[in-house]
Amino acid sequence: MPAIDTALVVVDVQNDFCTGGALAVPGGEEVVAEINKLIEAHDHVILTQDWHPAGHTSFASSHEGKDPFSTVELAYGIQTLWPDHCVQGTTGADFHAELQWTKAQAIIRKGYRPHIDSYSAFFENDRTTPTGLGGYLNERGITKILLAGLATDFCVGFSALDARDLGLDVTVQVNACRAIDLEGSLDAMHKAWSKAGVSVIS
Ligand code: VGL
Ligand code: ZN
């Protein structure tokens, strides 16, 4: 495993994406044991944390008459609407209790702007607002990342594509990811990864 010069980026392993959470990803908590092993094996560990203010624009509850998992047209384009989740400071936004996160060197919070969602760890859903992670890695001379976490076809997936756009060497550890799989989104993401040159390992 290329642990020395590779940063492990652990995406959104938070209570709301695990069984019993507000936006539960099937089997979400199953990634924790595998990710803990990856954390042990890597010298550079970065976490992302979905971190929405109450009333966030990605919540169906913020759009009258709209149901979760439908879509809406926002200023920056089509946005999928979600149940209220990962609200700043709530238990649902906390990392899973068994995730061994203390070694993490940085935690990138995303989705905190009230009117923009952010799936990717690098750019928000308007595709132009950076989170700062690209600059952080660049300044530290890190050019390779390994991604794991939730959800494969949204936050992990778009993080991988954006990282390739930034010229990084990107691998996704798919056995340490779980998917939402909304209308073929998992299949579409695998196709997009292969086009973009994202490596996949399990
Ligand atoms: C995510 C939907 C909404 C994710 C976050 O972590 O994949 N998905 N917010
Ligand atoms: Zn979210």
Image: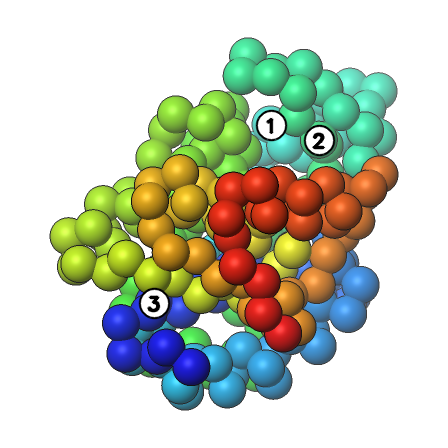
| Amino acid beneath label 1 | Thr
The residue that mark 3 highlights is 7
Q: How many marks?
A: 3
Q: Whole-Å distance between the Cαs marked 3 and 1? A: 31 Å
Mark sitting earlier along the chain (3/1): 3
Give the residue displayed 34% in from the left and 61% down from the top: 144
Q: Position of residue 34 (x, y in %)?
A: 59, 82
User: Mark 3 touching mark 1, by CB under 8 A?
Assistant: no
> Residue 80: which disc?
2
- Specify whether 93 is left or right of 64: left
| Amino acid beneath label 2 | Thr
Q: Nearer the viewer, residue 171 or 137?
A: 171
In this rendering, the label closer to the viewer, 3 or 1: 3
Residue 135, compared with residue 63, is above or below; it is below
The residue that mark 1 highlights is 57
Q: Residues within 10 Å of mark 1 (few under 14, many from 20)?
A: many
Q: Nearer the viewer, residue 79 or 90?
A: 79
| Residue 167 location, quadrant | top left
Q: Residues within 10 Å of mark 3 (few under 14, many from 20)?
A: many
